[in-house]
Amino acid sequence: QVQLVESGGGLVQPGGSLRLSCAASGFILPYYAIGWFRQAPGKEREAISCISSIDNSTDYTDSVKGRFTISRDNSKNTVYLQMNSLTPEDTAVYYCAAEARLGPCHSKADDYDYWGQGTQVTVSS
């Protein structure tokens, strides 16, 4: 059974950090690109970062560049999103998604094959 499970969300003060994890099972993670998306209340889903399958190249949306870092540990079937210098604008439900893709990752949500259930990140003092 294919499954993606996010964890690591929570409440953090502005300027703080969190590390999200996306644990994969039921498929061979090295052959999949992984994307992180988020959705805040009343807003559309936003692609924030992705990591490619073969060369581990990464991409970030402008609002998180320099603050967020995506990485993967295929031996643990897990992808991480390190989030630093968090602001209230980062408050959202964060989702990871997987796409069977050998080329560069991308931000087109409809092309991703599997999705996790999401983890809430709240940045507030």
Image (spheres, rainbow, N blue to C red):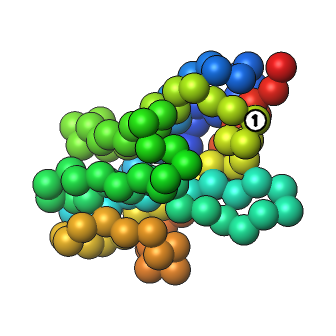
Front-most of 24 and 90? Answer: 90
Provide residue 17's location: percent of width, then percent of height: 57, 22
Q: Residues within 10 Å of mark 1 (few under 14, many from 20)?
A: some
Residue drawn at 69 percent across, 32 percent down: 87
Residue 93 lies left or right of residue 55; in this view the side is right
Q: Quadrant of the C terminus?
A: top right
Query: Toward which corner of the image does residue 9 lie, by quadrant?
Result: top right
x, y percentage for residue 53? 22, 59
Using the rendered image of the protein, determine whether residue 14 is visible from the camera's viewpoint.
yes
Of the pair 124 and 94, the residue shown nearer to us: 124
Q: Is residue 97 above or below residue 13?
A: below
Q: Residue furthest left?
A: 55
109 to 118, vertically: above or below:
below
Relative to 85, 97 lies left or right = left
Q: Relative to the observer, which residue lies in front, 22 or 54?
A: 54
Where is residue 89 shown, x and y percent of the image?
Answer: 73, 42
**Residue at the bottom extreme, as displayed:** 110
Q: Secondary structure at mark 1?
A: helix
Residue 27 position by quadrant: bottom left
Residue 77 % position (x, y): 32, 43
Residue 29 visible in image? no
Tell me the kind of residue under disc 1.
Answer: Pro
How many marks on residues? 1
Q: What residue is rendered at 55% in x and 49% in y? A: 63
Name the residue that disc number 1 marks: 88
Identify whether 77 is placed above or below 34: above
User: Could you tell whether 19 is left or right of 25 in the image?
Assistant: right
Q: Quadrant of the N terminus?
A: bottom left
Q: Residue at x 48, y 61 (%)?
A: 97
